[in-house]
Amino acid sequence: MKLQETECQIMANLEYERACSCLKQAEGNASMDFWDVVANRLYYAVFHAVSALLIKDGLT
């Protein structure tokens, strides 16, 4: 099943919002020196950002 362009755009935007949220969480935890949590949040920020790009390019 192939998604319509508007559906892809919505999904890409949601993934981008998740990436931004994870990045904000990483920044907050870095200020408290919780480096293991920072690494986890940065991993997921990159994961969601790349997912957004892949969805936007139709490579889901």
Image (cartoon, rainbow, N blue to C red):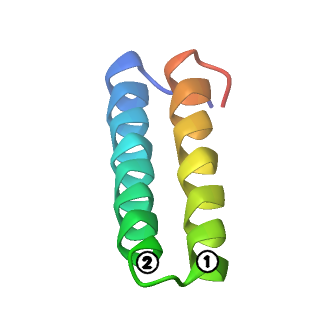
Q: Nearer the viewer, residue 1 or 31?
A: 31
- Left or right: residue 6 versus residue 60 is left
Residue type of the residue flagged with mark 1: Trp
Q: Distance between the residues labelled 1 and 2?
A: 7 Å
* Residue at disc 2, secondary structure: helix
Q: Relative to 10, is 18 above or below?
A: below
First-in-chain label (1 vs 2): 2
- Image quadrant holding the C terminus, namely top right
Count every numbered label the image shows and give the total.
2
Q: Relative to 53, is 36 above or below?
A: below
Residue type of the residue flagged with mark 2: Asn
- Image quadrant holding the N terminus, namely top right
- Percent of width and height locating residue 30: 46, 72
- Residue at 56 percent of width and 71 percent of height: 38
- Residue at 35 percent of width and 46 percent of height: 14
Instruction: Write down the residue under mark 2.
Output: 29
Asked if one can make out residue 42 in the rendered structure from this viewpoint, the answer is: yes
- Residue at 41 percent of width and 84 percent of height: 32
- Left or right: residue 20 versus residue 34 is left
Which image quarter: residue 37?
Answer: bottom right
- Left or right: residue 39 versus residue 3 is right
- Percent of width and height locating residue 50: 61, 35
Instruction: Write down the residue under mark 1.
Output: 35
Q: Nearer the viewer, residue 4 or 20?
A: 20
